[in-house]
Image: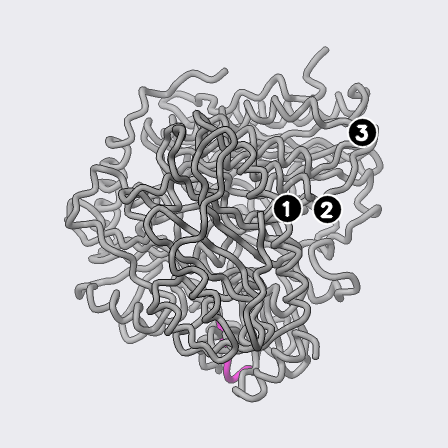
């Protein structure tokens, strides 16, 4: 079943007439869209609209160069700064005027007023549960997509390892990773690469402005968005010439072994792991999720001066680790 | 090169912003502001979070809560080391996961009564706030951000200098056979080495068609820009439009240029640049306190009978902690909007007109100025990257 068909099925089950989506990863979940990558959060706005009755996806874009081949151009609506024009564009979408129940993935006071104008009869509910359900179903396309991103992420981390020497700075390593991604034709990170000291006082995400010193333990992180799919990894090294990869943190192997079909996300978190789905970006998983074969999971664990993060593919037996520097 | 606006003092910058927000809250009759958008949290608190894709950034978002008359905003973050040293401990808190219903309740329990404003809400937080009357935080943010303090202008100037210096390193690499994404890689590596806090947008190196009809499909019938950079090879004679933005101390920059690949600029391209320059100069001639956005639109005039910018963007936009923010000049908000916008000292204008000769592509560049007491000061110094500027 196509991703859109699966979405429409869930909309029918939940009596949702329309989805109004502001999050790029959610838009990517229902249709192939590759708009400009911007860092950081974006205020909610109608970037993508799904109508159940017509099974149509409408995309905010000025061109079909950012949607999949064959996308009907009459389902594009253009960029505007004018709320009245946006309202008119939404009003022209077949199926919005008489919508009774609409799910959204965020809200602002201004957009709340605007959507009330476009869909006067609609009850507004959360689109989050629908996407959580779509993401909890194993998906062969996702497996291939995340594996492609994992190759790029590993390439970036590998380049950082080569460049990790005494006197190099975290910023320089960030640049090395971006250049390595670009050499693979990828200019969009999941996050800007990180090289951070692993002493007790520091985060593993926002390194200080200083050069690394010989013998220091350093955590390296790289994450790529490739064709709209995300993968990331982290490893620990001791700085030297060359720098030496450290064994995984104590307890890591047992954690990985616990990531089998039937395991609960809450149990893994109680053991100190950071866990989320990997797919169209971070796919937040609730504690209650029980993992199933085929799911792609990000697993992270730190113990003292050792940090590790990988993407695992869940199977009936031991999970498959798909990330490697 | 541009001249420093002042000796940058980040602690003073943060104090001034908090004072401006407090004044704006009082003027708008708002008692509490909840900020969930990262650029707004950064504006209010000076905090930093790792640069990340949209959904990851939402997942680990920091939240700021401002109370009228309080000396600092409360900051809730997963990254306390990103908070400035001057934020007192009692205002720095562990993150609240407002993407979940439980987190949303935890935050709303901390918010006092009175009139509440919010900028952007994950749905669970919106749902938790629905029983209250909530106004859009732009009522507070827009007046606070509309004009910049000298420290803010200096941040923008320094951010722009990093962006431009990186582009100087990239320009020689734009040769036939190079891939557009190779230029992106060189740029991203250069800004990291030059001290950028983060990158803010996938750098755009877009080869333009000669005619709009050559594609890609355009909703408005105008040239389509920007399209994300692909790993395609550059060819001799390609006309490439560039657009990049980086972050320094929370402030954005905006570089725009037109590069000709693998050959000298020809007479048509030289003329296109001259027309672009003349449009900006005509508008700059009118930039002073008291002038309106409509005055700038009028001064920019027409180029070959059409408004010389993309109708879906603007003649000029502001810049600050967001890469495009008020003031907007020449948008589809219309003439009345432009006529009502009066320039004041401290406003920033990023001019980005477009000259287009269908069949011969066109020229797009960007130039940044700040409105001063008697005119303007330049925050971008990009002349040596102006194709067609020589001779």
Viewer-proximal residue among B384 and B135 = B384
Q: Are marks 2 and 1 in contact (CB under 8 Å)?
A: yes
- Secondary structure beneath dot 2 equals loop
Label 2 to label 3, Cα distance in Å?
A: 27 Å
Q: Which residues are magenta?
A: A99-104
Q: Residues within 10 Å of mark 2 (few under 14, many from 20)?
A: some
Q: In this rendering, do the residues under marks 3 and 1 share a single chain? A: yes
Viewer-proximal residue among B331 and A319 = A319
Q: Residue at x 42, y 73 (%)?
A: A265
The residue lying furthest to the top in this view is B391
Label 3 to label 1, Cα distance in Å?
A: 32 Å
Vertical comparison of B387 with B303: above or below: above
| Residue A236 on the magenta segment | no
The image quadrant that residue B9 belongs to is top left
Q: Residues within 10 Å of mark 1 (few under 14, many from 20)?
A: some
Q: In this rendering, do the residues under marks 2 and 3 share a single chain? A: yes
Q: Residues within 10 Å of mark 3 (few under 14, many from 20)?
A: some
Q: Earlier in the sequence, mark 3 or mark 1?
A: 3
Q: Which residue was labeled with disc 3?
A: B176
Vertical comparison of A139 with B116: above or below: below
Q: Provide residue B377's location: percent of width, then percent of height.
A: 44, 21
Subunit of mark 1? Answer: B
Q: Residue at x 78, y 61 (%)?
A: A69
Q: Provide residue A177's location: percent of width, then percent of height.
A: 56, 39
In this image, A30 relative to B357: left or right?
left
Q: Earlier in the sequence, mark 2 or mark 3?
A: 3
Q: Which residue was labeled with disc 1?
A: B311
Label 2 to label 1, Cα distance in Å?
A: 8 Å
Subunit of mark 3? Answer: B
**Closer to the observer: label 3 or label 1?**
3
Q: Main secondary structure of the magenta part?
A: strand
- Secondary structure beneath dot 1 equals loop
């Amino acid at each position: 079943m196509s991703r859109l068909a699966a979405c429409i099925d869930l909309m029918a089950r939940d009596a949702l007439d329309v989805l109004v989506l502001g999050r790029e990863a959610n838009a990517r979940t229902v249709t192939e869209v590759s708009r400009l990558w911007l860092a950081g959060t974006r205020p909610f706005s109608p970037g993508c609209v799904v109508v159940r009755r017509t099974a149509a996806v409408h995309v905010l874009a000025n061109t079909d160069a950012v949607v999949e081949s064959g996308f009907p151009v009459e389902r594009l609506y253009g960029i505007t700064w004018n709320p009245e024009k946006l309202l008119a564009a939404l009003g022209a979408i077949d199926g919005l005027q008489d919508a009774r129940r609409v799910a959204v993935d965020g809200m602002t006071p201004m957009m709340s007023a605007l959507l009330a104008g476009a869909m006067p009869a609609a009850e507004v509910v959360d689109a989050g549960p629908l996407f959580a359900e779509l993401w909890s179903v194993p998906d062969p396309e996702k497996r291939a997509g995340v594996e492609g991103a994992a190759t790029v992420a590993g390439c970036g981390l590998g380049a950082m390892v080569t460049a990790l020497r005494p006197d190099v700075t975290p910023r320089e390593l960030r640049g090395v990773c971006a250049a390595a991604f670009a050499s693979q034709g990828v200019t969009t990170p999941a996050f800007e690469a990180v090289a951070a000291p692993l002493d007790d006082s520091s985060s593993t995400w926002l390194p200080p402005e200083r050069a690394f010193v010989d013998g220091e333990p350093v955590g390296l992180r790289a994450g790529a968005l490739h064709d709209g799919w995300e993968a990331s990894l982290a490893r620990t090294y001791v700085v030297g010439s060359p720098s030496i990869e450290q064994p995984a943190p104590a307890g890591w192997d047992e954690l990985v072994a616990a990531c089998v079909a039937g395991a609960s996300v809450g149990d893994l978190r109680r053991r100190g792991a950071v866990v989320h789905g990997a797919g169209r970006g971070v796919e937040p998983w609730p504690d209650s999720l029980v993992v199933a074969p085929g799911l792609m999971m990000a697993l992270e664990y730190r113990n003292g001066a050792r940090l590790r993060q990988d993407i695992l593919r869940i199977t009936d037996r031991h999970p498959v680790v798909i990330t490697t520097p | 090169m541009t001249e420093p606006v002042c000796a940058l003092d980040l602690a003073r910058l943060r104090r001034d912003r908090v004072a401006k927000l407090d004044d704006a809250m009082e003027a708008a009759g708002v008692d509490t502001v909840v900020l969930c958008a990262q650029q707004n949290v950064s504006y209010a608190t000076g905090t930093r979070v790792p640069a990340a894709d949209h959904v990851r950034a939402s997942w680990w978002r920091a939240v700021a809560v401002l109370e009228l008359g309080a000396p600092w905003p409360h900051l809730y973050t997963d990254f306390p080391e990103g908070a400035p040293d001057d934020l007192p401990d009692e205002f720095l808190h562990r993150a609240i996961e407002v993407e979940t219903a439980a987190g949303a309740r935890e935050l709303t329990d901390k918010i006092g009564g009175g009139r509440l404003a919010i900028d952007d809400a994950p749905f669970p937080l919106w749902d938790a706030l629905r029983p209250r009357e909530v106004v859009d935080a732009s009522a507070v943010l827009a007046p606070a951000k509309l004009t910049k303090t000298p420290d803010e202008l200096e941040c923008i100037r320094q951010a722009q200098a990093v962006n431009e210096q990186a582009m100087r390193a990239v320009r020689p690499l734009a040769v036939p056979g190079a891939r557009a994404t190779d230029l992106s890689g060189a740029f991203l590596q250069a800004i990291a080495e030059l001290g950028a806090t983060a990158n803010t947008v996938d750098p755009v190196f877009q080869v333009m068609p000669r005619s709009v009809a050559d594609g890609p499909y355009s909703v408005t019938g105008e040239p389509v820009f920007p399209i994300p950079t692909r790993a395609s090879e550059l060819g001799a004679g390609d006309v490439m439009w560039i657009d990049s933005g980086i972050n320094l101390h929370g402030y954005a920059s905006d570089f725009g240029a037109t590069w000709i690949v693998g050959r000298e600029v020809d007479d048509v391209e030289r003329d296109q640049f001259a027309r672009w320059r003349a449009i900006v100069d005509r508008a700059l001639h009118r930039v002073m306190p008291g002038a309106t956005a409509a005055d700038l639109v009028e001064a920019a005039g027409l180029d070959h009978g059409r408004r010389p910018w993309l109708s879906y963007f603007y003649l000029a936009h502001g810049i600050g902690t967001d890469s495009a923010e008020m003031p907007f000049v020449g948008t589809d908000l219309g003439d009345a909007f432009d006529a009502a916008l009066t320039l004041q000292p401290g406003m920033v204008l990023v001019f980005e007109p477009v000259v287009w000769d269908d069949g011969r592509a066109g020229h797009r560049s960007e130039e940044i100025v700040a409105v001063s007491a008697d005119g303007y000061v330049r925050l971008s110094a990009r002349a040596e990257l102006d194709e067609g500027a020589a001779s």
